[in-house]
Image (cartoon, grey):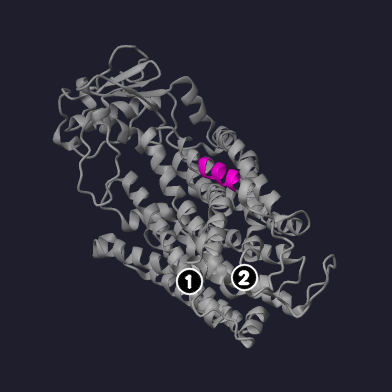
Amino acid sequence: MSTMNPTVGESPAMTKEERKVIFASSLGTVFEWYDFYLYGSLSAVIAVQFFSGVNPTAAFIFALMAFAAGFAVRPFGALVFGRLGDMIGRKYTFLITILIMGLSTFIVGILPNYETIGIAAPIILIALRLLQGLALGGEYGGAATYVAEHAPHGKRGAYTSWIQTTATLGLFMSLLIILACRASMTAEDFASWGWRIPFLVSVVLLGISVWIRLMLSESPAFVKMKAEGKESKAPLTESFARWGNLKIVLLALFGLVAGQAVVWYTGQFYALFFLTQTLKVDAQPANLMIAAGLLIATPFFVIFGTLSDRIGRKPIIMAGLALACLTYFPIFKAITHYANPALEQAIATSPVVVTADPAECSFQFNPVGTSKFTTSCDVAKASLVKRGIPYTNVAAPAGTPAVVSVGSTQIDYAIASIAPAAPAADAAAPAPATPAAPAAASGSHSPVPAPAAAAATSPAAVYDKALGAAVVAAGYPAKADPAQTNTVMVILMLTILVIYVTMVYGPIAAMLVEMFPTRIRYTSMSLPYHIGNGWFGGFLPTTSFAMVAATGDIYYGLWYPIVIAAATFVIGMLFVRETKDVDIDRIA
């Protein structure tokens, strides 16, 4: 702990050394999270630049999978750097992690895209993501442990809550720099080369972070343990091969971190994807609204961290999980209502139903681009997903071609398949549908073929045109209308989501530190944290987006975080004990 050792109940003022520890650890971690989150914030651009060999829906899911790859290796980074941190010290370990993170991010900024070097581009990109994930796997545990071991008793929640702000602040910084770049150039220039600038800027942040961390001294708890010769010779064995400690690791994972992770990623990442990919809000206003929500809610990390020193960590974390489970559906429906009311109105008045043989309906994810989705069901669903149109499924008898109902209008694939082809000049990919297209806008209950005059060269293209005309005629917007977006209310909904994040995340660093002894603390707390956040949380955007694409229900992806948060709430309430009064100076 720190050189101060007040009795319980005292509230000592923060010393200059303690302020430096918190500032240096937090600022360095902000920069690391900035590096890591650039990729998430630019997933749509990354999909075009590095995964352009597949269709847009598969490219975006594959880009999210590459993003998730960095999370997948975080537990391995926790094992590698956690072991080093418990054996050689906290300070030197997270100097290494920030160097790996910063250099990997800089290289992304100069990496040639798919059009330039082909399949090597996504391969190298994923390799860099893996390096970033390994580095981040060692970063958080070191920073949280380092700050907690400097904090006086009764202040660990308040002190470590500053570390908890770093992920949000890193995301906030990445959004601001991206917005500045977008505002300073045309959309075409940003999509072509401007997106690289935020990655290149990371080399400056890297230099600042390394300089700051070189100023730090080693954790006093580690120095004391080292002087007494009580450091662990095999922290991995002690942490995970002995049931007494392994049981605590499992409780930390399933009773705390898994739920915290899904609430965290739903409130900050999935909310952004929902705005831009599902509700078709332009990237710039969506990022601004997310940034505003983060700015308003971020102080609550410190508020809830400080409150946890008084009433306990567990009640605050469990309350955040419960609120998320109970309110996610109404909050996201409210976001739809305020961000894209035209879409909400179209869903209510002209619901889309796909009636098809289930055997013809594939899960359309093909990252290597080798499979072809040509059945009538696949063509219909791909057309709807491409336009962001939600739909429901109805099973049809085997062998029945797909029929899509848009309100009272039906578009029958069997009729589209015999439509005459257009002249060669119209043989390009299907053009966006216009409201003037006949038949689909007729409102009749009979099947409506695609018009011959607008036909393309294939039944799939004809069907795509007919569906496009039908959804436009039914009032489904191609994108959200800024004039109809209630920005204040969207920001309010996003702020509530981030406040849930602050409830589950603000106190958790202190709680994890307090669950494990000094000799194996870095290793023991890092693994459950990064399995929870790297796997349960990191795969949330990919999994939820794929669930939506598979079902057609724009809210279906919310079941992923709700089920995990609910399970964590039950396990945490039954089996996890309060830790705020634990003496973290204990060695064994």
The answer to which quarter of the image holds residue 429 is top left
The residue lying toward the viewer, choosing from 144 and 270, is 144
- The disc placed on residue 236 is 1
Q: Is residue 216 visible to the viewer in this orientation of the structure?
A: no
Q: Amino acid type of disc 2?
A: Pro
| SS class, disc 1 | helix
- Residue 508 counted in the magenta span: no
Q: In the figure, 483 relative to 447: above or below?
A: below
The residue lying toward the viewer, choosing from 498 and 172, is 498
Image point (78%, 73%), residue name: 14
Residue farthest to the top?
Answer: 445
Can you identify the residue that label 2 sits on? 517
Predominant secondary structure, magenta span: helix
| SS class, disc 2 | loop
Q: Amino acid type of disc 1?
A: Leu
Q: Position of residue 543 (x, y in %)?
A: 41, 46
Q: Position of residue 314 (x, y in %)?
A: 68, 52
Q: Quadrant of the C terminus?
A: bottom right
The answer to which quarter of the image holds residue 485 is top right
Residue count near mark 2 (Cα–Cα under 10 Å), binned few <14, some 14–19, many ≥20: some
The residues bearing labels 2 and 1 have C-alpha atoms spaced at a distance of: 13 Å
Q: Is residue 60 left or right of residue 369?
A: right
Magenta region: which residues? 563-571
- Residue 564 counted in the magenta span: yes
Image point (58%, 67%), residue name: 30
Q: Is residue 553 left or right of residue 8?
A: left
